[in-house]
Amino acid sequence: MEEVYEFLKKCGAYYLATVDGDQPRVRPFGTYLIFEGKFYIQTGKVKNVSKQMMKNPKVEICAFSGDTWIRIEAKAVEDDRIEAKRAMLDAFPQLQQMYSADDDNTQVLYLKDATATFASFGGEPRVVKF
């Protein structure tokens, strides 16, 4: 999990895919956090991405750095605890202009049953599960 975290940190942005009915939806994200041994992402409950993950929690993340990319498939599980929200907002203080740990909009989710595949154009893919 630490390796996945460090790779996404190096990338900065990653792309999160969800499903909206029968239509895939992909958008850039930039939040990631390891909290209490779990890998978290963050969004707002009013956003379509939140509604999509609540209806179908299967997500996929993709990011690219240099000649290596990562694909992470997982289930997004909401953690509505204020401690988890505070940890995310402390890690990304720029979010505090839009979100608060005690508002009804801030949403943090951890990745459950995650499989991360590191790949490049010349090597064998390597899988990490967390």
Image (cartoon, grey):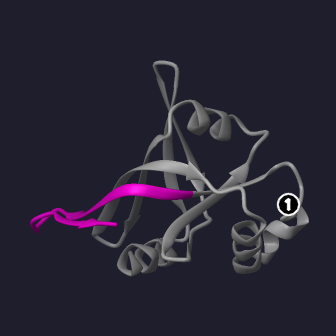
The residue located at (79%, 39%) in the rendering is 46
The image position of residue 77, as x and y in percent, is 54, 50
Position of residue 8 relative to residue 78, above or below, is: below
- Residue 91 percent across, percent down from the top left: 69, 79
State how many labels appear. 1
Write down the quadrant of residue 2 in the picture.
bottom left
The spot of residue 97 in percent (x, y) is 90, 66
**Residue segment shown in magenta:** 110-130
In the picture provided, is 108 more to the left or to the right than 8? right
- In this rendering, the answer to whether 103 lies above or below 8 is above
| The stretch drawn in magenta includes residue 42 | no
Q: Where is the C terminus found, in terms of image quarters?
A: bottom left
Residue at x 63%, y 39% (from the top left corner): 49
Q: Is residue 106 left or right of residue 36?
A: right
Q: Is residue 115 left or right of residue 110?
A: left
Residue holding disc 1? 99
Magenta segment's dominant SS is strand
Q: Dividing the picture into quarters, in which one does residue 108 lie?
A: bottom right
Give the residue type at disc 1.
Answer: Tyr
Report the quarter where the N terminus lies.
bottom left
